């Protein structure tokens, strides 16, 4: 597709896209991918517009892929899983209550029903793409799955929301403007987007709880920043 590229897998000697390797008594799937040529996407409105346009193109391209078992990216289930995982972290009661409130708000909001959905990148942020001219290449599809397309937009917007406050509004406007050059967002998607910004924060907590070991003081700092965002009135 013009203006769009992805990192493609390098086949094994047997012609497969990936290999199964034993690691600490568990079979893990491993893959080797081609590197994409290009420059990093700059955290500037012009590049963010280009990124947003390419993200919408990516959603269109992924919709053409027919596959079997695909990881489900269900917002409510991801919140519930995060609460369970955070239970193992000491002094996490406050952030777990904040996550539960977000989950309850999603369940009660009718705009969350029947949102446009399909195959998603799963971790759509500027650091997972490169630019070459007017083309954008995406990589790091480790978190891909099937869910509302707002999963990807919310992730990108979350990175802007936790960045430099003076630039947040302009960058959010830029990505939405770029995205809508290729696919218009419905009124329901516009209203639901703040839920998915919070969901991106919740998924970040889930990743840390399941895969990382942090010192107690660092956990408390993470919880403080996350609680602040989850309880903030997000206007997009």
Image: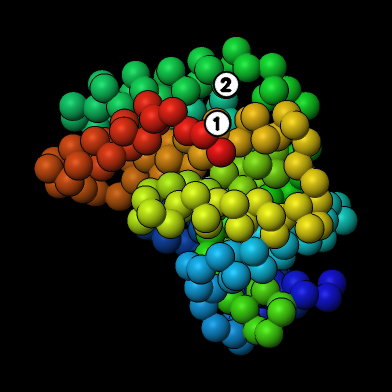
Mark 1 and mark 2 in contact (Cβ < 8 Å)?
Answer: yes
Front residue of 161/206: it is 161
Front residue of 108/66: it is 108
Which residue is depicted at the point 56% across and 38% down? 236
Tag of residue 76 = none
101 to the left or right of 143: left
Which residue is depicted at the point 34% across and 45% down? 208
Mark 1 Cα shell of 10 Å, populated few (<14), some (14-19), many (≥20): many
Q: Quadrant of residue 112?
A: top right
Query: SS of the residue at dot 2?
Result: helix
Q: Quadrant of residue 82?
A: top left
Q: Among all residues in the image, which is located at the extreme left?
A: 217
Which residue is depicted at the point 61% across and 48% down? 153
**Could you tell me how many numbered marks the image carries?**
2
**Residue 188 in picture, x, y percent from top left:** 73, 29
**Residue 84 in picture, x, y percent from top left:** 39, 26
Which residue is depicted at the point 63% across and 30% down? 192
Q: Is residue 226 above or below residue 174?
A: above
Is tag 2's residue or tag 1's residue first in the polypeptide sequence?
2
Residue 204 in view, yes or no: yes
Pointer 2 residue? 106
Mark 2 Cα shell of 10 Å, populated few (<14), some (14-19), many (≥20): many
Q: Quadrant of residue 91?
A: top left
**Residue 69 in picture, x, y percent from top left:** 74, 44
Residue 67 in view, yes or no: no
Work out which quarter of the rendered image holds the N terminus and state it. bottom right
166 to the left or right of 214: right
Query: SS of the residue at dot 1?
Result: helix
C-alpha gap between disc 2 and disc 1: 7 Å
Tag of residue 195 = 1
């Amino acid at each position: 597709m013009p203006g769009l590229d992805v990192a493609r897998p390098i086949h094994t000697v047997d012609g497969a896209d990936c290999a199964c390797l034993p690691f600490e008594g568990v079979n893990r799937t491993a893959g080797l991918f081609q590197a994409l040529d290009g420059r990093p996407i700059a955290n500037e409105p012009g590049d963010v517009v280009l990124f947003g346009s390419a993200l919408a193109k990516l959603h269109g391209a992924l919709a053409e892929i027919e596959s079997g078992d695909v990881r489900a990216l269900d917002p409510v289930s991801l919140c519930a899983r995060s609460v369970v995982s955070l239970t193992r972290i000491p002094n996490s009661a406050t952030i777990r209550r904040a996550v539960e409130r977000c989950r309850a708000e999603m369940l009660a909001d009718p705009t969350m029903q029947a949102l446009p959905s399909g195959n998603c990148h799963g971790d759509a942020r500027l650091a997972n793409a490169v630019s070459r001219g007017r083309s954008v290449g995406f990589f790091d599809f480790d978190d891909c799955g099937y869910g509302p397309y707002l999963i990807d937009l919310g992730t990108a917007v979350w990175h802007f929301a936790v960045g430099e406050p003076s630039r947040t509004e302009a960058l959010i406007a830029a990505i939405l403007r770029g995205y809508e050059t290729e696919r218009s967002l419905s009124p329901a998607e516009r209203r639901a987007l703040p839920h998915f910004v919070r969901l991106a924060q919740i998924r970040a907590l889930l990743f840390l709880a399941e895969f990382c070991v942090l010192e107690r003081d660092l956990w408390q700092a993470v919880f403080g920043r996350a609680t602040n965002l989850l309880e903030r009135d997000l206007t997009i």
